[in-house]
């Protein structure tokens, strides 16, 4: 297929592009003029085109000859709360508008949403696709609104929505600080009790299966590695990978109080207003981070599309660690 991807220069988007190219698909990556396209330029059958995701007229010319669209662009780093809706909801509205106005529209559309669109759980019972969504953050609400926008065209093409949990792996800059802290012997634990996670290349493979599958339009899928994790066992897996069989260094585990995250987020927001730079840790992140359970079940995508996560936690963090080291990040 000839696939248009938004967000292909991002962490997960780059793994999606890599997975599709490795399986014979052609890529047209929609990028900003300022985007770093070095990695995409190294992939075969990949073309980068410049467009503004906030202007459907800018997108329309690039839908020519496209069979499917994967919308992986979206934002978690913001200057203010309204940025979540600008980056996640409005870009989706403009992309859908461009498809509506294209004479030969793509036959498939995949939206990469988030478990935050569904909201957290109070008990350790994995979320399934039939559960009602109840997001608690603006980030989650903006993602759920993006899903609603996409559902307006589910009768015109094959729509699939996928909600990943925490995604980690090579090229992920957000998780780097966790690895750096553990390398120094310190693990900071957020308030949450358990979470689902998935290795980036595994998540990309699930998305490819959605692209190639015969699932019903409007299908919604969760995807994870099949286990429930805590930040503590995630941290100890990283420590094991860092030690590499050598005598283990002591790992100091410090629980971060919810209130500290709140005020840290407030300070970051103030700093963003002063400097004009976006930040990841905000009070909105606190709304999600203080929740007890962010767990989901990938049973449906396993049954309908045959997905199985191939990478264990220790394998995934080892691959990620090796990539960080090769890049000189650690």
Image (spheres, helix red, strand yellow):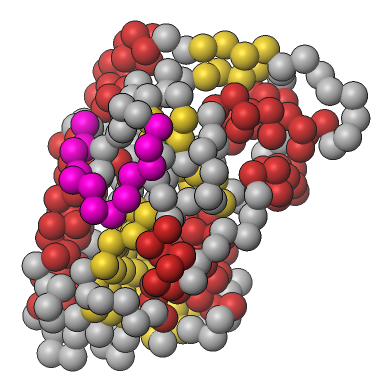
Q: Which residues are magenta?
A: 124-136
Is residue 122 on the magenta stretch? no
The overriding secondary structure of the stretch rendered in magenta is loop
Q: Nearer the viewer, residue 219 or 211?
A: 219
Quarter assignment of residue 253:
top right
- Image position, residue 95 (x, y; %): 19, 67
Looking at the picture, does residue 58 appear above or below residue 82? below
Given residues 280 and 240, the one toward you in this image is 240
- Residue 265 shown left or right of residue 190 in the figure: left
Seen at 14% across and 65% down, the residue is 151
Determine whether 105 is above or below 13 in the image. below
219 with respect to 196 (left or right)? left
Identity of the residue drawn at 15% across and 69% down: 96
In the figure, 101 relative to 186: above or below?
A: below
Quadrant for the N terminus, please. bottom left
179 sits to left or right of 79? right
Residue 11, can we see it?
no
Nearer the observer, 158 or 49? 158
């Amino acid at each position: 297929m000839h696939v248009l991807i938004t967000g292909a220069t991002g962490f997960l988007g780059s793994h999606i592009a890599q997975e599709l190219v490795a399986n014979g698909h052609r890529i047209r990556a929609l990028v900003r003029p300022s985007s770093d396209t070095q990695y995409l330029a190294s992939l075969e059958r990949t073309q980068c085109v410049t467009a503004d995701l906030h202007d459907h007229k800018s997108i329309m010319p690039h839908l020519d000859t496209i069979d499917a669209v994967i919308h992986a662009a979206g934002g978690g780093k913001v200057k203010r709360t309204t940025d979540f809706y600008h980056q996640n909801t409005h870009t989706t509205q403009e992309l859908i508008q461009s498809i509506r106005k294209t004479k030969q529209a793509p036959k498939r559309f995949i939206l990469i949403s988030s478990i935050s669109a569904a909201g957290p759980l109070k008990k350790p019972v994995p979320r399934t696709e039939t559960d009602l969504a109840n997001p608690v953050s603006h980030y989650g609400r903006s993602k759920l609104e993006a899903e609603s926008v996409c559902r307006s065209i589910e009768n015109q093409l094959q729509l699939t929505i996928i909600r990943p949990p925490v995604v980690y792996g090579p090229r992920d800059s957000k998780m780097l600080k966790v690895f750096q802290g553990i390398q120094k012997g310190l693990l900071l634990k957020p308030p949450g009790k358990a979470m689902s996670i998935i290795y980036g290349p595994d998540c990309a493979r699930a998305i490819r299966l959605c692209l190639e599958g015969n699932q019903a339009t409007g299908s919604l899928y969760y995807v994870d590695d099949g286990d429930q994790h805590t930040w503590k066992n995630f941290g100890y897996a990283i420590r094991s990978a860092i030690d590499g069989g050598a005598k283990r260094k002591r790992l100091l585990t410090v629980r971060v109080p919810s209130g500290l995250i709140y005020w840290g987020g407030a300070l970051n927001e103030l700093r963003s207003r002063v400097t004009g730079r976006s930040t990841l840790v905000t009070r909105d992140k606190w709304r999600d981070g203080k929740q007890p359970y962010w767990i989901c079940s990938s049973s449906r995508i396993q049954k309908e599309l045959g997905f199985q996560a191939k990478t264990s936690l220790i394998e995934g963090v080892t691959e990620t660690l090796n990539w960080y080291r090769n890049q000189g990040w650690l």
